[in-house]
Image (cartoon, helix red, strand yellow):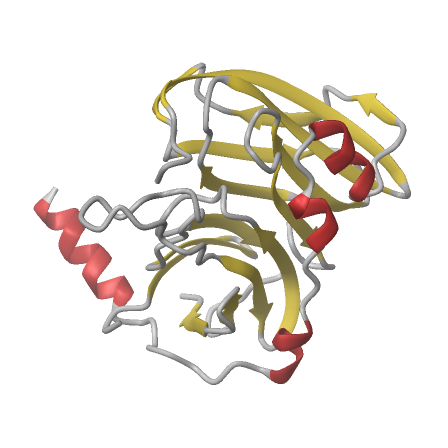
Amino acid sequence: MQRNRIRLAALIGAVTGAILLPLRALAAQWNEKAFDETRFPDALKSVGALDLVESEQIELKTPEIAENGAIVPMQVTSNIPDTEKIHVFAEKNPQPLVASFTFRKGTQPFFATRIKMGESARVHVVVLADGKYYTISRDVKVTIGGCGE
Amino acid sequence: MADPMRMRITRKGDVADVKMLIFHPMETGYRKNTVTGEIVPKHFIKTLQAMHNGATVLEVEWSRSVSRNPFLHFRVNGAQAGDKITIAWQDNFEQTGGGEAVVK
């Protein structure tokens, strides 16, 4: 454990502090309408996902039981060719759309992150690939809700 | 903040495996201050870009439902030792931050 910490500290040393933000970063897109939707079907529509096909080519890893809804780890891998975007929804959150990822040339259609869940709900992942939408979902039981966090 | 983010990159062949942690409150706007009872205003990172040697490879849109001190793990193809991975983010208060690390 101690050794790991030292190694991590050495790696962190390679990270520079605050950097000047490239101008183009300021022009980044944020889908306000979709993020503000309060119903899951509306949020789906607002990201453009109308016809969804269930796909086993999407791997979604979530815990079956999340003790703390403020920190629910999740990992997604899309094995669908030409994956452009991946959206994450927590069906019963006050605003169900949690995150959207756009993969440019050179990035694998993979990510892991940690999300908040207000209560037990189904987590849906929607993949946009070659103009079509694919989906997979899993139930996550939340012991203590995380929306007050 | 003295330590705005941490990045850790490991390389397997030509794939850079990037793990990063940003220190940010990610307030939902639903939480009450336990002392004053007032609602803590929503304050969250909306967009994040990852760049590989200056070219954008990943664009992320986040909501209030991403956990405090956001963690992100992603993988970049075609990476070589000496390449730079740069992160830049912007929150709903127009605050910005980021970091850069070199692939080993």
Quarter occupied by the C terminus of chain A? top left
Residue B46 is left or right of residue A57, and the answer is left
On the rendered image, what quadrant is the N terminus of chain A found in? top left
| Residue B89 image point, x, y percent | 51, 67
Quadrant for residue B14, please give it.
bottom right
Q: Inspect this view and state whether residue B77 appears.
A: no
Q: Is residue A137 above or below residue A129?
A: above
The quarter holding residue A92 reads: top right
Residue lying farthest to the front in this orientation: B37
Identify which residue, A32 or A111, lies in the foreground: A32
Residue B28 drawn at (x, y percent):
44, 47
Q: Please state the horizontal and vertical placement of residue B93, each as a whole percent of the image.
A: 48, 69
Between A37 and A89, the one lying in front of the other is A37
Q: Quadrant of residue A123?
A: top right
Question: In the image, what residue occupies the spot 43% across and 73% down?
Answer: B97
Position of A79 relative to B35 (above/below): above
Residue in view at x 69 percent, y 30 percent = A39
Residue beneath the point at 26% across and 48% down = B33
Count the marks. Answer: 0
Q: Nearer the viewer, residue B13 or B9?
A: B9
Note whether residue A12 is visible. Answer: yes
- Residue in the image at 54% along x and 19% along y: A121
User: Is residue A52 found left or right of A66 in the rendered image?
Assistant: right
Residue A15 vertical placement versus A99 (above, below) = below
Q: Residue B3, position in %: x, y?
A: 26, 69
User: As displayed, is residue A115 above or below residue B2?
Assistant: above
